[in-house]
Amino acid sequence: MKAYLDNAATAVSYPLASFAHKDGFIGNPSSLHPVGLGARHALDDAKDILCAAFGGKRYNYIFTSGATESANLAIKGAARGLVERNITRNEIIVSQIEHPAVYETVFSLKELGFKPIVAPVNSLGFIGPDTVASLITEKTAMICVMAVNNETGVIQPIGDIFSFAKAANPKIITVCDTVQAICKGFEIPLAVTDIFFGSGHKFGGINGAGFLYLSETVFLKPLFHGGGQQSGLRCGTENPFAVSCMAYAVQEELNSNHCDKVRILGSILLDTLHAKGINTNAEKTDYIYSIHFDGIDSGKAFTFLSSKDVCVSRGSACSSSDAKQSRILTAMGLTPKVISETLRVSLSPFTDKAEILLFCDCMETLIKKAD
Ligand code: PLP
């Protein structure tokens, strides 16, 4: 691969050799013999790293297979917990730009009697705290707003939004998808956030491990029944290797200047493109860019770039094989033409300047051909 610029889909991982010397990757963490205990220690060590990075205690964290599972477990589990306790609040505010892992999960709860209330986004891809506040009623049970959007990179004001919610009713469950924010210089406002989650493969770990943070106040009905692992909240044998890779990436991030490095890489991208075409000028992460190339069909650009071994995406990875237009860019009011000429470029601390320049060069070729 000559240029991998699709790190929001799956980021380049740390070399597997970084993890290989560690013990505790074989055995079942529930076994009581030394091999099992080694696996248990690997999980505990990983929890300690998450606590140091994001706050909370070991018991606040649950390991999952990734963010989709975390979102389903958290949102469906908390909703079922409300039903079980006969709580009649049944409105769930969900931002218009949530990833399907959250958005579709919220809508699936209609079958349990919940009512999704969609919080609109403005033309910059930003969810205004006042807009969300105006949707809160005595029926609000939960609010789901992501920290950083996966298509535009726009940073959402979740501290303000969740503070409004807690001031209106401290029992409202605040849920934040932090997938594109974890290890990217974002501070989670823990005092007002009940639930947040991440996927290891988005920040230098490997596919197959994620985590879910739950505050003590959330009563969760589990989705899986089985051997009672993780206090019965997520039954099934944990994956110590993938979990340790995820924790390793978090630990590395704590000791790094990755954000500065990615900021510089982002400036190189913007300078080379003469800062043209970025679909928003809201405050955003340096890791993700939604770029409109006027007159260049993104499907054709994608094919051309792939033929040159340059990997980007046309939207989020999970929708890139889907002919439908991006729900997020549509919500921002971008025209179908602009959306069909937009590419997402996403960086990581391992991105090389040469990769960015190759991408820009390929786009320059396409622009010249189109003229
Ligand atoms: N939330 C956001 C913001 C994402 O970008 C993604 C993946 O792209 C997910 C959730 C789902 O993550 P996973 O596919 O690792 O379960």
Image (cartoon, rainbow, N blue to C red):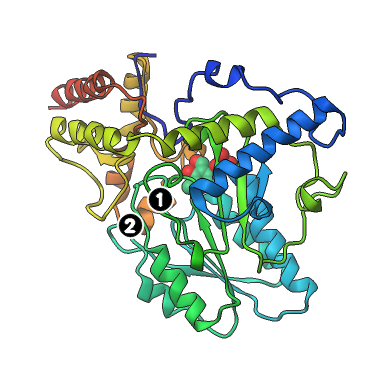
Q: Position of residue 70 (x, y in %)?
A: 63, 49
Q: Quadrant of the C terminus?
A: top left
Kindly identify which numbered label has been placed on residue 149: 1
Q: Amino acid at mark 2?
A: Gly
SS at mark 1?
A: loop
Q: Secondary structure at mark 2?
A: loop
Does the numbered disc 1 mark a residue whose Cβ is under 8 Å from ligand 1?
A: yes
Residue at 33 percent across and 57 percent down: it is 125
Q: Nearer the viewer, mark 2 or mark 1?
A: 1
Instruction: Evaluate if marks 2 and 1 touch, with contact meaning CB atoms under 8 Å apart.
Output: yes
Label 2 residue near ligand 1, CB within 8 Å: no
Question: Residue type at mark 1?
Answer: Asn
Q: Depth check: 271 or 348 in front?
A: 348
Residue with the mark numbered 2: 125
Residue under the point 11% across and 36% down: 274
- Residue 141 percent location from the top left of the image: 61, 74
Q: State the separation of the CA atoms marked 2 and 1.
A: 8 Å
> Image quadrant for the N terminus?
top left
In the rendered view, does 248 fall on the left or right side of 360? right
Q: Position of residue 177 (x, y in %)?
A: 51, 53
188 is higher (above) or lower (below) than 297: below
Residue drawn at 74 percent across, 68 percent down: 81
**Quadrant in which residue 360 is drawn:** top left
